Image (cartoon, helix red, strand yellow):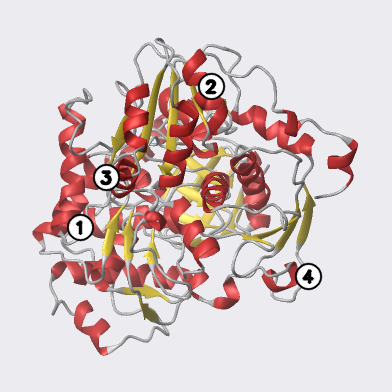
Amino acid sequence: MQAQAIQGEALTSGSAEGHVLFSDTALSFWGGVAPTSGEVIDRHHPLSGQIITGKVLAIPNGRGSCTGSSVLMEVILNGNGPAALVLEQADEILALGAIVAELVFGRALPVVSVGSAAFASLRDAAWAQVQADGQLLLSDQAPSASVQAATFAATSESPSAPSAQDATINGVPDGMQLSAQDQEILAGAQGKARQVAMQIVLRMARLQGATELIDVVQAHIDGCIYTGSASLRFAQQLCAWGAQVKVPTTLNSISVDQRRWRVLGIDPVFGEPASALGQAYVDMGAQASYTCAPYLLDTAPLAGEHIVWAESNAVVYANSVLGAYTAKYADFLDVCIALTGRAPKAGCHLPGNRYATLRIDVPAPQGADDAYYPLLGYHVGLLCGTQIPVLCGLEKSGLTSDDMKAFGAAFATSSAAPMFHIVGATPEAADAATALGGKAPTQSFSVSLQDLQHSWRELSSSPEPTVDLVALGNPHFSATECHALARLLQGRQRHPATQTVLTLGRAVKEQARANGDIAVLEAFGVNLITDTCWCMLDEPVVPVAARVIMTNSGKYAHYAPGLTGRQVHFGSLAACADTACTGHAPHTLPAWLLPSPATESAPA
């Protein structure tokens, strides 16, 4: 290709240049990029093993976890980040990580969105220069090594970035209507923490195209996950500024079991700051709920209530199953909205943005077990990208809340969509036409059992039959799941070489204890861990010598190879229980996943 100029939209400040690292597959920074090295560790991604440091990273958008913003900020501050980030479409989670790095820490990373046609042209580019106004200059040849070195030395100092002290927004975004209280917060009358939080909220409101802010009735903060020293510095700075939440606020899983991390053998170098991060948000007035499944708490929102929830599985559950209104809030924006009580009126806070645009016809296999729903969620998420789907074909399936939880967590892992509809099962999908808002879908898909077999083999890819660890509780187990597991394990013996570890929230553990299920699980030898979750757990909870993990979570089956370096088997809860007793994973596909003329001819 010859030299080419592209005009994009600058989402953040700064300019940079570097080698182009291109992929047309969306990437989750959480579980997809190692903050300490800049390596792409998502073993399902085409860029797996590549280093993003110093590159102009070109990806369509982010996906998966809301913690992607925290990981991006982490790599920016520790010097392992890309030189610039070029997106096909604006991504709020990734943009926010760069915005917080700029406003709070004075470190700028250029983030530009360019649209579909221009994005495709980056595929053949070797070198790109990203200018402050969003223009990209592309070349098919990189400059000489000496020029590259000079460029890196210049851009690494981030000369265009504002200082941490001077990082303020000049005025209010054009067209934005602020209430008297908003103006008071922005002027600093309610303290520095709320002032900076409002600045960040307004910056994101501009990005989202919002013209006003709305009140929220509660928050769930995902920013309490420890991704490195930057995440703790952010929280401690807010505390130093006197931060206090303005609405009832719960906390997501943190990175350690706060009460038992020393007993579990966690290195204090990690355990102490990870625990301190959770405590910092408690000091701001948040509840020490420490669960990635806040919909299981007594404080779960009602249909139609406007809330600010982060944690990807919680967001899709709140929107889709509870009928509450929340965007897929990135880490740090959740905190800022909790401090101000105000959110941009955009995204799924607007009824018109909650309609499906995709129709997906799915099979309901005869005799399917509980592994069907996380498998289906993972596969559907891959089809959706950022678009909201409506699923048809499950009207007679009788989905439980646990089925919805498993489906939603896997769906949120492989997509960037904030919600889904299932005809006859979710509150805004009485039928397909209702879910679609009376419009024809932009695309329609039909999922076959052969399609699901392919996704099963992606999630369950280990050739090793012997399993060293059964990992359960991603998202956190419900009381009904605890009871089901207790029934499966009661009176049986644990295989001596296979550990079983279950993560759950404090409140659910007490419910399960009252039901007698905890006694059964502990008698079998299940290690019960609260406060944290599998996306944050590694050695020594994952045994050093362990090579193979089995899980019933589609979410964890996707993330575990990159996060732990272990191989994974995926299966139902019953299959996991059997593996805990035998030490071996099933060696064949479940019978319900094998195609037959009856199941392949039409959706059930």
Tag 1, which secondary structure?
Answer: loop
- Of mark 4 and mark 1, the one earlier in the sequence is 1
- Is 598 on the left-hand or right-hand side of 503? right
Cβ atoms at labels 4 and 3 below 8 Å apart: no
Which amino acid type is marked by label 3? Glu
Residue drawn at x 75%, y 37% as measured from the top left: 451
Tag 3, which secondary structure?
Answer: loop
Tag 4, which secondary structure?
Answer: loop
Mark 2 vs mark 1, CA separation in Å = 57 Å
Which amino acid type is marked by label 1? Ser
- Of mark 4 and mark 3, the one earlier in the sequence is 3
Q: Which mark is residue 578?
A: 2
Residue drawn at x 31%, y 24% as measured from the top left: 541
- Of mark 4 and mark 2, the one earlier in the sequence is 4
Is residue 260 visible to the viewer in this orientation of the structure?
yes
Residue in the foreground of this view, choosing between 10 and 499: 499
Residue in the foreground of this view, choosing between 600 and 152: 600
Q: Position of residue 359 (x, y in %)?
A: 74, 59
Q: Which mark is residue 163?
A: 1
Residue 108 vs 77, above or below: the answer is: below
- Is 584 on the left-hand or right-hand side of 286? right
Mark 3 vs mark 1, CA separation in Å = 12 Å
Q: Which residue is mark 3?
A: 157
**Mark 3 or 2, closer to the camera:** 2
Is residue 131 visible to the viewer in this orientation of the structure?
no
Which amino acid type is marked by label 4? Ala
Q: Position of residue 322 (x, y in %)?
A: 49, 65
Mark 3 vs mark 2, CA separation in Å = 56 Å
Q: Which mark is residue 352?
A: none
Q: Which residue is mark 4?
A: 440
Mark 4 crowdedness (10 Å alpha carbons): few <14, some 14-19, many ≥20: some
